[in-house]
Amino acid sequence: MKSVLIGVGQAGGKLARELVEYDERMGFGSVRGAVAVNTAKTDLQDLPFETVLIGQDRVKGHGVGGDNELGAEVMQSDTQEVLSALDGRVVAGTESIFVVAGLGGGTGSGGAPVLTRELKRIYDVPVYGLGILPGKDEGSMYQVNAGRSLKTFAREADALLLVDNDAFRSVGESVTEGYDSINHEIAQRVGLLLASGEAVEGVAESVVDSSEIINTLRSGGIAALGYASAEAAPDAEENINAVMSTTRRALLTGSSLPDATDADAALLIVAGDQDAIPRKGVERARRWVEEETGSLQVRGGDFPLSSDRIATLVLLGGVERSERLETFLQRAKDAREEDVEGAAERTDPAEQWTNDELDDLL
């Protein structure tokens, strides 16, 4: 699935870089171009592709300070600069555009939905969102921003693939280490998904191509992506259990949005050496996904790849009923209410000089 990436905000730019590097390292050729957009000049300096600094007249290259309303306003004003940077990148062979953003910050959460709306107005290819939810310990401002951005981003995009930071962070990791490992995990999953239709090694017995991804995401709303892998035996028949176990782990414990199992549609992709992928195992796993998700629209196929492991991807479309998503939205709502209450309790220093006793004295 030949795609162009647009990283919005600090987190979006870093994840876009990780996706580009993974695609190049694996030799897939699925990422056909990338652009990073930000209001903070320093966040663009280390990115190895074209960058666009927006909002210079408002924030002078210093970022929006977590204000996602300002992030949306700036993007609305400077969208043309971003579109100009895309000239020559979204070409005839492009099959999708991914707008990548962290939903907790200001530029990403405010700007990504605005940019997505404009892209859909101009380009006749699906425009998907890749959004990162903040972890529960990342502060109330990030929860509020993400809660506000999530619904808007999902409405504007053809589908919003969500990643929950809490699903990947390990105990004992520093913040930087945590984000780096999360980006690596996401890039591996999304990179394999985009490459699954590319002719890399051998010929798939049951072909997966970009249309399968598009049809799985066609219902819109929220999407999730699961992944798991295991060592493969040389003989395909010996890998039936491996395919089944990795499928279960991908859906139940390896998802970008944990606990999201009820879905409108699903796509199962089994990657590995062509001679090691059991056709019977792929079909059995597809039926299991059908039963587990309650969807009759479950597609499946294999992706020949030179590897001594079996890897399984499960893409779910339409997972709005996820318990994890409901928990997050409640957390965002609680954080907003606490913020409003806190603002009400804080007294304006000027108010202490506007009372009757002081007026009399003066």
Image (cartoon, helix red, strand yellow):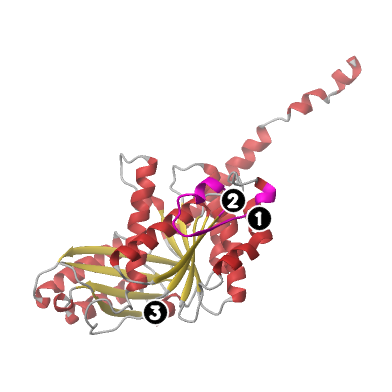
Image position, residue 77 (x, y; %): 69, 59
Residue at position x 14%, y 78% from top? 275
Q: Amino acid at mark 1?
A: Val
Residue 283's place in the image compared with 150, above or below, is: below
Question: Given this view, does label 3 or label 2 mark the residue nearer the observer?
Answer: 2
Cβ–Cβ below 8 Å for labels 1 and 2? yes
Q: Earlier in the sequence, mark 3 or mark 2?
A: 2
Viewer-proximal residue, 325 or 75?
75
Q: Earlier in the sequence, mark 1 or mark 3?
A: 1
Q: Residue 210's mark? A: 3
Q: Magenta segment range?
A: 38-58
Q: Dot 2: what SS?
A: loop
> Mark 3 and mark 2: span between their CA atoms?
33 Å
Residue 5's place in the image compared with 105, above or below, is: below
Q: Which residue is mark 1?
A: 74
Viewer can see residue 146: yes
Q: Residue 39's mark? A: 2
